[in-house]
Image: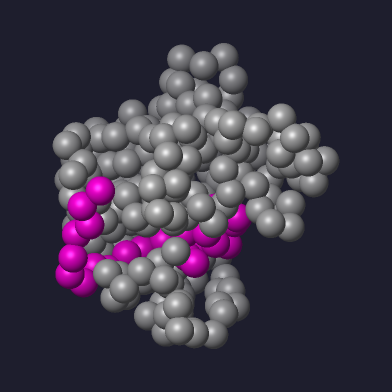
């Protein structure tokens, strides 16, 4: 993997979730990103900078997600956009799920594109398929198709399986996380949130990408993660 050098700017959506936090931690350790803006409902506490992580380059901006079109100015002039917003289809009504995961997502993608963002790195999930019988897969598939046709210079979609955290605070919950750890001895079904963040940020710097739209499934992300650790 050849890494792009030089200074880059990024915007992150979904930085408070388990995947988003993994992306934020990876960006803090990545010197190629000189400025990172987190767009959130409300600001969050960030760790202090240390020898490995630079959090002083982060800026936080609050946004009313009920009034997305009014916030176009927040999305201007970023090199790269990272998108990790997600809700469980079991936790809200179908109408609300489609609003958050489809309507809002496409509105945010359009504002990034209109703001001259060159590349987007977008987390969807395993089972994404616009022809799926399941709401999650169908909606995520529609998002991938629509965002992929918006004309970004590069559009990378990440389809992780179960996302694990060190304290089992992720979307799987502690009981399911325990079972997944026991059965996923080949690391094909799950991935650690911090590793996923590192893979996404590293891939955003990869200048060997040959297609404007790429899809990375869980096994491929595990493979990249192993290569990063060497």
- Residue 96 position (above or below residue 14): above
Q: Which stretch did the figure color magenta?
A: 1-25
Q: Does residue 45 sit above or below 216 in this rendering? A: below
Q: Please give the name of the residue rendered at 32% of the width and 50% of the height, measured from the top-left corner.
A: 203
Pick the front one: 205 or 224 = 224
User: Which residue in the rendered view is the most extreme toward the front?
Assistant: 230
Q: Position of residue 43 (x, y in %)?
A: 55, 74
**x and y, in percent, of residue 176 in the image:** 77, 37
Total tally of numbered discs in the picture? 0
Is residue 34 or residue 105 the one in the foreground? 34
Q: Is residue 100 visible?
A: yes
Residue 146: x, y in percent? Answer: 32, 32
Q: Is residue 208 left or right of residue 103?
A: left
Report x, y in % for residue 36: 36, 71
Please state which of residues 65 and 229 is positioned toward the viewer in this rendering.
229
Residue at 49% in and 34% down? 218
Left of 98 or right of it: where is 103? left
Tell me: residue 118, above or below residue 88: below
State yes or no: residue 109 in magenta. no
Q: Quadrant of residue 97?
A: top right
Q: Is residue 59 left or right of residue 214?
A: right
Work out whether 229 lies above or below 74: above
Q: Residue at 64% across / 47% down in the picture?
A: 164
Q: Of 110 and 137, which appears nearest the observer?
A: 137
Residue 82 in view (yes/no): no
Residue sitting farthest toward the right: 175
Q: Tell me what residue is drawn at x 48 percent, y 26 percent.
A: 128
Please identify the quadrant where the C terminus is shown: bottom left
Please tell me in which quadrant of the rendered image residue 72 appears.
bottom left
Color encoding of the figure: one colour
């Amino acid at each position: 993997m050849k890494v792009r050098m030089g200074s880059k700017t990024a915007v992150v959506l979904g930085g408070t979730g388990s995947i988003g936090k993994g992306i934020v931690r990876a960006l803090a350790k990545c010197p190629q990103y000189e400025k990172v803006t987190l767009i959130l409902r409300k600001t969050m506490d960030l760790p202090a900078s240390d020898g490995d992580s630079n959090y002083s380059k982060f800026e936080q901006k609050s946004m009313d997600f009920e009034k997305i079109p009014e916030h176009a100015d927040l999305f201007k002039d970023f090199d790269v956009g990272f998108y990790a917003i997600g809700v469980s289809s079991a936790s809200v009504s179908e109408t609300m799920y489609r609003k958050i995961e489809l309507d809002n997502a496409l509105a945010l993608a359009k504002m990034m594109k209109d703001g001259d963002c060159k590349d987007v790195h977008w987390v969807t999930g395993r089972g994404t398929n616009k022809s799926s019988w399941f709401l999650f897969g169908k909606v995520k598939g529609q998002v991938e198709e629509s965002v992929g046709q918006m004309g970004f210079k590069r559009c990378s979609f990440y389809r992780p399986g179960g996302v694990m955290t060190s304290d089992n605070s992720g979307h799987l919950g502690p009981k399911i996380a325990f079972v997944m750890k026991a059965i996923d001895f080949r690391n094909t079904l799950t991935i650690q949130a911090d590793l996923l963040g590192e893979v996404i940020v590293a891939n955003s710097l990869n200048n060997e990408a040959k297609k404007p739209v790429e899809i990375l499934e869980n096994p491929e992300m595990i493979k990249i993660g192993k290569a990063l650790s060497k």
